[in-house]
Image (cartoon, grey):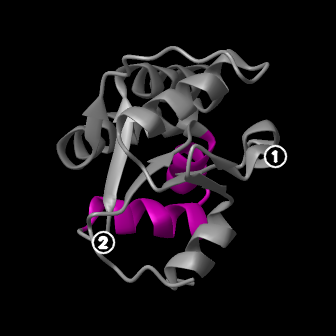
Amino acid sequence: MNLGTAVNYRVVLDTNILISAIGFGGKPRKILLLTLGDNFQGVTSSILLAEFHEVIIKKFPELQKILPIVERKISKKFLIVKPRKTLDILKDKDDNRVLEAAIEGNCAFIVTGDKELLKLKNYQGIKVLTAEEFLSVRRYS
Protein backbone atom coordinates (compact mmCIF):
# COMPACT_ATOMS: atom_id res chain seq x y z
CA MET A 1 0.00 0.00 0.00
CA ASN A 2 1.58 3.26 -1.10
CA LEU A 3 -0.14 6.45 -0.10
CA GLY A 4 2.35 8.79 -1.74
CA THR A 5 3.58 11.93 -0.04
CA ALA A 6 0.40 13.97 0.13
CA VAL A 7 0.22 16.26 3.13
CA ASN A 8 -3.49 15.48 3.52
CA TYR A 9 -2.60 12.28 5.41
CA ARG A 10 -2.60 12.99 9.11
CA VAL A 11 -0.63 11.11 11.75
CA VAL A 12 -0.32 11.11 15.53
CA LEU A 13 3.20 10.39 16.75
CA ASP A 14 2.93 8.83 20.20
CA THR A 15 5.11 10.25 22.98
CA ASN A 16 7.48 7.27 22.81
CA ILE A 17 8.10 7.97 19.12
CA LEU A 18 8.79 11.67 19.75
CA ILE A 19 11.21 10.88 22.57
CA SER A 20 12.98 8.24 20.48
CA ALA A 21 13.18 10.73 17.62
CA ILE A 22 14.93 13.45 19.60
CA GLY A 23 16.92 11.22 21.93
CA PHE A 24 17.99 8.30 19.82
CA GLY A 25 17.39 9.05 16.13
CA GLY A 26 16.75 6.22 13.72
CA LYS A 27 13.37 5.66 12.12
CA PRO A 28 11.44 7.74 14.68
CA ARG A 29 13.65 10.75 13.86
CA LYS A 30 13.10 10.22 10.16
CA ILE A 31 9.33 10.23 10.76
CA LEU A 32 9.50 13.36 12.92
CA LEU A 33 11.55 15.18 10.28
CA LEU A 34 9.11 14.14 7.57
CA THR A 35 6.26 15.37 9.74
CA LEU A 36 7.97 18.70 10.41
CA GLY A 37 8.45 19.02 6.67
CA ASP A 38 5.55 19.05 4.28
CA ASN A 39 5.22 15.32 3.74
CA PHE A 40 2.14 14.85 5.89
CA GLN A 41 0.32 16.56 8.75
CA GLY A 42 1.31 15.76 12.32
CA VAL A 43 -1.51 15.85 14.86
CA THR A 44 -1.29 16.13 18.63
CA SER A 45 -3.22 17.52 21.58
CA SER A 46 -2.30 19.70 24.54
CA ILE A 47 -2.58 16.60 26.76
CA LEU A 48 -0.09 14.68 24.59
CA LEU A 49 2.26 17.68 24.48
CA ALA A 50 2.12 17.93 28.28
CA GLU A 51 2.90 14.21 28.58
CA PHE A 52 5.86 14.61 26.19
CA HIS A 53 7.20 17.54 28.24
CA GLU A 54 6.72 15.70 31.54
CA VAL A 55 8.43 12.50 30.39
CA ILE A 56 11.45 14.44 29.07
CA ILE A 57 11.81 16.35 32.35
CA LYS A 58 11.44 13.25 34.55
CA LYS A 59 13.19 10.54 32.57
CA PHE A 60 15.49 12.21 30.02
CA PRO A 61 17.05 15.29 31.65
CA GLU A 62 19.83 15.28 29.03
CA LEU A 63 17.20 16.19 26.42
CA GLN A 64 15.87 19.20 28.34
CA LYS A 65 18.15 21.65 26.55
CA ILE A 66 16.54 20.93 23.16
CA LEU A 67 13.01 20.56 24.52
CA PRO A 68 11.97 24.20 23.89
CA ILE A 69 13.15 24.01 20.27
CA VAL A 70 11.29 20.75 19.61
CA GLU A 71 8.14 22.00 21.33
CA ARG A 72 8.23 25.21 19.27
CA LYS A 73 8.58 23.29 16.02
CA ILE A 74 5.78 20.90 16.94
CA SER A 75 3.49 23.77 17.96
CA LYS A 76 4.21 25.50 14.66
CA LYS A 77 3.85 22.52 12.29
CA PHE A 78 1.46 20.07 13.98
CA LEU A 79 -2.28 20.45 14.12
CA ILE A 80 -3.13 20.69 17.83
CA VAL A 81 -6.60 19.30 18.46
CA LYS A 82 -8.94 19.45 21.43
CA PRO A 83 -10.65 16.04 21.56
CA ARG A 84 -14.37 16.27 22.26
CA LYS A 85 -14.76 12.57 23.09
CA THR A 86 -13.19 10.79 26.04
CA LEU A 87 -12.37 7.13 25.45
CA ASP A 88 -11.91 4.37 27.99
CA ILE A 89 -10.98 1.44 25.77
CA LEU A 90 -7.41 0.65 26.81
CA LYS A 91 -6.08 -0.01 30.32
CA ASP A 92 -3.50 2.77 30.10
CA LYS A 93 -5.36 6.08 30.16
CA ASP A 94 -2.51 7.79 28.25
CA ASP A 95 -3.07 5.38 25.36
CA ASN A 96 -6.70 6.46 25.23
CA ARG A 97 -5.54 10.08 24.87
CA VAL A 98 -3.59 9.07 21.75
CA LEU A 99 -6.71 7.52 20.23
CA GLU A 100 -8.75 10.61 21.11
CA ALA A 101 -6.29 12.92 19.34
CA ALA A 102 -6.21 10.67 16.28
CA ILE A 103 -10.00 10.58 16.05
CA GLU A 104 -10.39 14.32 16.56
CA GLY A 105 -7.65 15.03 14.02
CA ASN A 106 -9.20 12.70 11.45
CA CYS A 107 -5.92 10.80 11.23
CA ALA A 108 -5.05 7.95 8.94
CA PHE A 109 -2.24 6.70 11.22
CA ILE A 110 -0.93 6.45 14.75
CA VAL A 111 2.79 5.70 15.00
CA THR A 112 3.76 4.12 18.31
CA GLY A 113 6.00 1.68 20.08
CA ASP A 114 3.31 0.97 22.69
CA LYS A 115 2.32 -2.71 22.70
CA GLU A 116 -1.25 -2.18 23.87
CA LEU A 117 -1.93 0.38 21.14
CA LEU A 118 -0.21 -1.78 18.53
CA LYS A 119 -2.47 -4.73 19.41
CA LEU A 120 -5.39 -2.71 18.06
CA LYS A 121 -3.79 -2.60 14.57
CA ASN A 122 -6.73 -0.50 13.41
CA TYR A 123 -9.16 1.64 15.35
CA GLN A 124 -12.11 3.28 13.60
CA GLY A 125 -10.17 3.22 10.33
CA ILE A 126 -6.96 4.58 11.87
CA LYS A 127 -4.00 2.28 11.27
CA VAL A 128 -1.79 1.79 14.34
CA LEU A 129 1.77 1.12 13.20
CA THR A 130 5.34 0.88 14.44
CA ALA A 131 7.86 3.36 13.06
CA GLU A 132 9.22 0.68 10.74
CA GLU A 133 5.75 -0.26 9.47
CA PHE A 134 4.86 3.38 8.89
CA LEU A 135 8.01 4.04 6.87
CA SER A 136 7.37 0.89 4.86
CA VAL A 137 3.76 1.89 4.13
CA ARG A 138 4.81 5.44 3.34
CA ARG A 139 7.79 4.31 1.23
CA TYR A 140 10.27 6.46 3.11
CA SER A 141 12.46 3.65 4.40
Write the start and end of the magenta stretch as one range: 16-37
- The reply to whether discs 2 and 1 touch (Cβ–Cβ < 8 Å) is no
How many numbered callouts?
A: 2
Q: Residue at x 65, y 28 (%)?
A: 95
Q: Residue 39: which disc?
A: 2
In terms of sequence position, does the residue under pointer 2 or pointer 1 come before the other? 2
Q: CA distance from mark 2 to mark 1?
A: 27 Å
Instruction: Indicate the amino acid at tag 1.
Output: Lys
Left or right, residue 72 beside residue 62? left
Is residue 56 rendered to the left or right of residue 40?
right
Query: Which quadrant, please, contains the C terminus?
Result: bottom right
90 inside magenta stretch: no
Please tell me whether residue 81 is drawn above or below residue 74 in the rendered image: above
User: Where is 14 relative to 33, above or below?
Assistant: above
129 vs 84, nearest the viewer: 84
Amino acid carrying label 2: it is: Asn
